[in-house]
Amino acid sequence: MVTAKEIMHQHTFVPAGMPINEVAALMTEKKIGSVLIKTAKGLGILTERDINGKVVAKAKDPKKLKAEDVMTFPAKTIAPNTDIYQICAIFTENRFRRLPVVDNGEVLGVLTTRDVVKQFVPPLIRETYHFQDFRF
């Protein structure tokens, strides 16, 4: 059975006080959809959805808001040995697209729906539909 540890990817941390416009620029530069924030209270996650819904849609100034003002807290996390079917259930039930992978309080990586899709779309399907160049 495939587990989170096997398919997760590298995570990116930003300081809690980083302005949202700088976070968005970093996410754009790194082509990532989320960043993690460590605070004294625990782990938070800041996603594209958070920025769109809590800043852009409400016409707030991204230079005045900080990562900790907009992040989802506490972040729902999964253990590295969580199997792919449990992960799919968590994504579906909670409408999440990203989950930090944590072991004994240490962040090991981030798992996304894209990481899961890569496991379910066999190479033959990609070739059949000419998705070789498609970014999964």
Image (cartoon, rainbow, N blue to C red):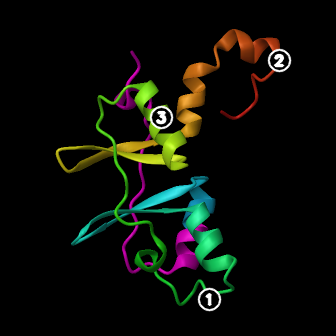
Q: Position of residue 120 (x, y in %)?
A: 59, 20
Crowding at dot 2, Cα within 10 Å, few <14 / some 14-19 / many 20+, comes out as few
Give the Cα separation between the discs numbered 2 and 1. 43 Å
Q: Residue 61 carries which label?
A: 1
Left or right? Give the position of 56 relative to 40. right
Q: Which of marks 3 and 1 is nearer the N terminus?
A: 1
Q: Which amino acid does label 2 sit on?
A: Tyr
Find residue 101 and report its image quarter.
top left
Crowding at dot 1, Cα within 10 Å, few <14 / some 14-19 / many 20+, comes out as few
Give the Cα separation between the discs numbered 3 and 2. 27 Å
Q: Which amino acid does label 1 sit on?
A: Asp
Magenta stretch, residue numbers: 1-25
Q: Residue 89 carries which label?
A: 3
Residue located 61% across and 79% down the image:
55
Give the Cα separation between the discs numbered 3 and 1. 36 Å
Q: Where is residue 64 in the image (x, y as percent from the top left)?
A: 53, 90
Question: In the displayed structure, would residue 105 be above or below residue 134?
Answer: below
Evaluate if marks 2 and 1 touch, with contact meaning CB atoms under 8 Å apart: no
Q: Which residue lies furthest to the right in this view?
A: 129
The residue at which mark 2 appears reads as 129
Q: Earlier in the sequence, mark 2 or mark 1?
A: 1
Residue located 50% across and 33% down the image:
88
User: In which quadrant is the N terminus drawn?
Assistant: top left
Left or right? Give the position of 125 relative to 25. right
Find residue 133 and report its image quarter.
top right
Residue located 69% across and 77% down the image:
57
Q: Where is residue 71 in the image (x, y as percent from the top left)?
A: 45, 69
Q: Position of residue 48 (x, y in %)?
A: 60, 62
